[in-house]
Image (cartoon, rainbow, N blue to C red):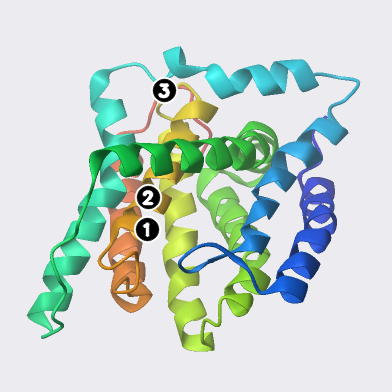
Amino acid sequence: MPKPFAFFGLVFLLSVPFWLLGSATGASLLPGLPIAALMALCPVLAAVILTWRSGARTLLARALDLRRIGAASWWAVLLLTVPAVSAACVLVMRAEGVAVPEPQIALVPTLALGALFLAGALCEELGWSGYAIDPLQARCGALRASLILGAVWAVWHFIPLLQAHRSPAWIAWWTLGTVATRVQMVWLLNRTGRSVFGQALFHAAANLSWQLFPVQGSFWDPRVYGPLMALTAIAMVVTGARRPSPGSPRGA
């Protein structure tokens, strides 16, 4: 039986060396991405440790469960939701008078960065979506489970965000967007055959959208992004309540 709260504790424990490395070096992997972000390895490590005798191989195989996603329309939703919100952010910021420049996107570097983000997202989602979310949903329903997981996911990032010199206000707005992102992800998980790869695709698209935001993410503003993601999550939840997916967990 999966133990989500033991999993959360183990993820935080395994992350400590990466936080210490970030504190000791101050190094960055990309603009705005401290070296402590290598803690993305920790969710899959924690999940493998907890399933070592009872299904680690089955868990890891879910990294390639593309066929579960189903219709091409779901692939479009997984890939394009966050980029669409990011484009809306640009429009809102320009309407507010912020001189957001046009994004400069080169194909080959973007594909390479996307592949790296997808690898990191798979490491995370094998833990968050492959191990932790199902027992949470069984216990308290999809919406509450997504809020709990979203909150844990956000808090887990706080130390790296502080190491990236983010202000408390920045982190607060970012947390709103992050929890809303997880609500969307759980909603989509329940409608795409519980595909871990689909979740990783959504996760990677979100990270790539941030890094491609002008200029190398420097204009990215969680004060705008957070509320727009929250509105998107609310729209998904309302749609799910009106048209429940057969066999999905209650509250989905």
**In terms of depth relative to the viewer, which is nearer, 114 or 205?**
114
The picture places residue 122, in percent across and down from the top left corner, at: 57, 35
Q: Is residue 19 above or below residue 141?
A: below
Q: Is residue 63 visible?
A: yes
Quick check: marks 2 and 1 in contact, CB under 8 Å?
yes
Residue beneath disc 1: 211
Q: Quadrant of residue 97?
A: bottom left
Q: Tell me the kind of residue under disc 3.
A: Pro
Nearer to us: label 3 or label 2: 2
Q: Tell me the kind of residue under disc 2.
A: Leu
Cα–Cα gap, marks 3 and 1: 37 Å
Residue beneath disc 2: 208
Q: Is residue 251 visible?
A: no
Q: Classify mark 3: residues with Cα within 10 Å, few (<14), some (14-19) or many (20+).
A: few
Q: Quadrant of residue 232?
A: bottom left
Q: Is residue 66 left or right of residue 168?
A: left
Q: Could you tell me which secondary element the residue under label 3 belongs to?
A: loop
Q: Classify mark 2: residues with Cα within 10 Å, few (<14), some (14-19) or many (20+).
A: many
Q: Quadrant of residue 104?
A: bottom left
Residue beneath disc 3: 246
Cα–Cα gap, marks 2 and 1: 5 Å
Q: Tell me the kind of residue under disc 1.
A: Gln
Q: Could you tell me which secondary element the residue under label 1 belongs to?
A: helix
